[in-house]
Image (spheres, helix red, strand yellow):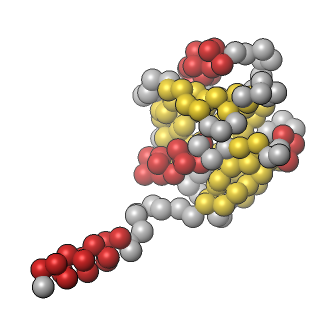
Amino acid sequence: MRHLILITLATLIGGIAPVGAQELKTTRWASYDISFLAPEDIEVEDDSEEGYIVSNPNYYITVQLLAGEGIKVSELPQELKNIAADDEVTEQTDVTSFELPQFYGAKLTGNCESERCVYSYLMAKDASCGFYVSIVCPKAHEQTAESILHSFKMEE
């Protein structure tokens, strides 16, 4: 009997979606053939060669071509800290490096005024291009922002 109660309880708990969970769908910046996951209700504000900006009430995502041709992967962390300082990002974490299937990345999180922000630079592994990514959201949505960042890929 006790075993049955535990199984029933586990099933009920497993079926409850976490608070703040967000359904994600693929969105694409056609100018540079990159895509990433974003909330289903995201609206495109700018889709030009200068940038790709999408938003909804909880997320403001900016993607831009990385300025400064010739930046090396080893320089990404310092360059990212510089832009975060210029943007007055407070309570910054240390920069962490990461790798995606098609990109080398560097990221930090901090506060952009009253919201949480994830700043990142992504450099294509084939050295063809790089991107600046900013995801601004409430702190409760920071985990989803990380999932968005780690979903970036170049279309083939």
Q: Residue at x 16, y 78 (%)?
A: 3
Residue 96, above or below 138: above
Quarter occupied by residue 75: top right
Residue 64, above or below 48: above
- Residue 111 position, x and y percent, is 48, 35
Q: Nearer the viewer, residue 143 or 112?
A: 143
Q: Is residue 49 left or right of residue 54?
A: right
- Residue 114 position, x and y percent, is 48, 41
Residue most extreme to the left? 2
Q: Residue at x 64, y 64 (%)?
A: 40
Quarter occupied by residue 69: top right
Q: Nearer the viewer, residue 18 or 74?
A: 74
Q: Residue at x 54, y 26 (%)?
A: 97
Quarter occupied by residue 52: top right
Q: Residue at x 31, y 72 (%)?
A: 13
- Residue 70 position, x and y percent, is 78, 14
Q: Is residue 5 left or right of residue 97?
A: left
Q: Is residue 41 visible?
A: yes
| Figure quadrant of the N terminus | bottom left
- Figure label count: 0
Q: Is residue 82 visible?
A: no
- Residue 155 position, x and y percent, is 80, 46
